[in-house]
Amino acid sequence: MRINKYFKLFESRSSNLSEEEFFKLLKENCQDFIKNPKPLQRVKHDSIMYSYINPKIHSRKDGSTASIAKIINLLIDNLPSWKEFPKRNNSIIASSNISTYQQSYGSEYYILIPFDGAKFGVAPALDLWEVKTRYLPDTNIDINLSWMQSRLKMLDVKTTSYKEFMDDLQSIYNQYIYDKSIFKDRDHLKSLFNTFINDNIENVEDGLNIYLSPSNLVTYRKEGFELNNYNDLKTDYPYEIWTDSECILYSLGFHNECDSCGGTGITGCDECWGIGLIDNGDGNEIECYNCNNGDVVCPECDGYEPLDRDQEYAKFLEKIKKI
Ligand SMILES: [Zn+2]
Ligand SMILES: [Zn+2]
């Protein structure tokens, strides 16, 4: 092994690894995984067989998908009730199993292996936009994070820092207390602020800290966000997870599901409408010359077979047994 590269590894956010380097890091730092492997999935655009990432070394740019949730991330990373959670802005985001197809992130599928001692934020859904507040007392509504993000963005508030954001939001709240007409009647922000007023909350940060706390954000599937150690992570459903721990990534391969055939590689024949039989002109049906029982190789993807992630993962686990 080239020692230089091994040490340089820890100076940048991410590095490519040789197979040897990968398995050395795995053995030295990832005993939690080796003893109890979990198929945590990370999807990206670039294709690298073996790699290392240190998400604490910040490199996330504005304009990336992460900035879509900029205000929500700003709140989650700074509200006191989220203090114990890894900072999303310095984390790698993944899902808690390999069952989902996540085309918007890319077509390369990876197994994410955290270093020992990693802590994970676990969302109650695969997508933060499904998450909502519990019913706000008195107003009988809930507010989803997607609405929250876009509504707060519409206000004249700075988002360059948490403090500026809170100061701006506080002055809007102060205005609202004296003049309820600054918001339209059906505006959910009005319901949120009315809830704060009913609770005698003067400080808008205190209000958000309660109603956007990890345990008060829910989906129909699961109540609240959780902070998990690696061994606590449940892999029965693909929840969004994030960690600021160093990790290594193993590529399961490329998967690009064809829109035309849904990834089966086969579509129905145009000549016989997928029946496999055509009229021979005498009123008798004969086998269609164009297909195999109505099936043809998909012209869009030329019969490309989708990646079997479960199978690739099983092969990887076999490999690990030998180290
Ligand atoms: Zn046919
Ligand atoms: Zn196809």
Image (cartoon, rainbow, N blue to C red):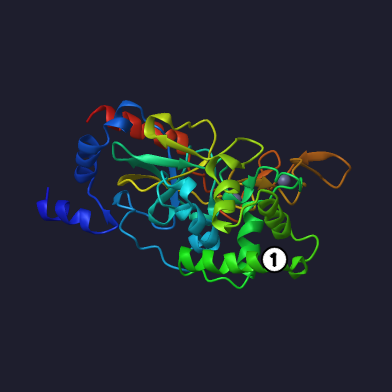
What's the amino acid at mark 1? Answer: Tyr
Q: Is residue 54 above or below residue 167?
A: above
Q: Residue at x 29, y 36 (%)?
A: 116
Hey, which quadrant is residue 46 in on the image? Answer: bottom left
Residue at figure coordinates x 20%, y 45% from the top left: 21
- Residue at 66 percent of width and 48 percent of height: 199
Give the percent coordinates (x, y) of residue 211: 60, 47
Where residue 10 appears, x then y in whole percent? 21, 53
Which of 271 and 168 lies nearest the eye of the viewer? Answer: 168
Question: 100 and 220: which one is in front?
Answer: 220
Question: Nearest the camera: 277 or 153?
Answer: 153
Number of labelled discs? 1
Taking the spot 35% from the left edge, 63% from the top edge, the residue there is 59
Work out which residue is located at the far bottom of the displayed protein and give it: 156
Q: Is residue 7 left or right of residue 114?
A: left
> SS at mark 1?
helix
Q: Is residue 283 above or below residue 190?
A: above
Looking at the rendering, in which quadrant would you find the C terminus?
top left
Disc 1 target residue = 176
Using the image, determine if residue 133 lies above or below residue 12: above
| 225 sits left or right of 85 in the view | right
Badge 1 residue CB within 8 Å of ligand 2: no
The spot of residue 99 in percent (x, y) is 53, 38
- Give the class, few, some or many, for how many residues have Cα within 10 Å of label 1's Cα (few <14, many ≥20): some
Front-lying residue, 89 or 210: 210
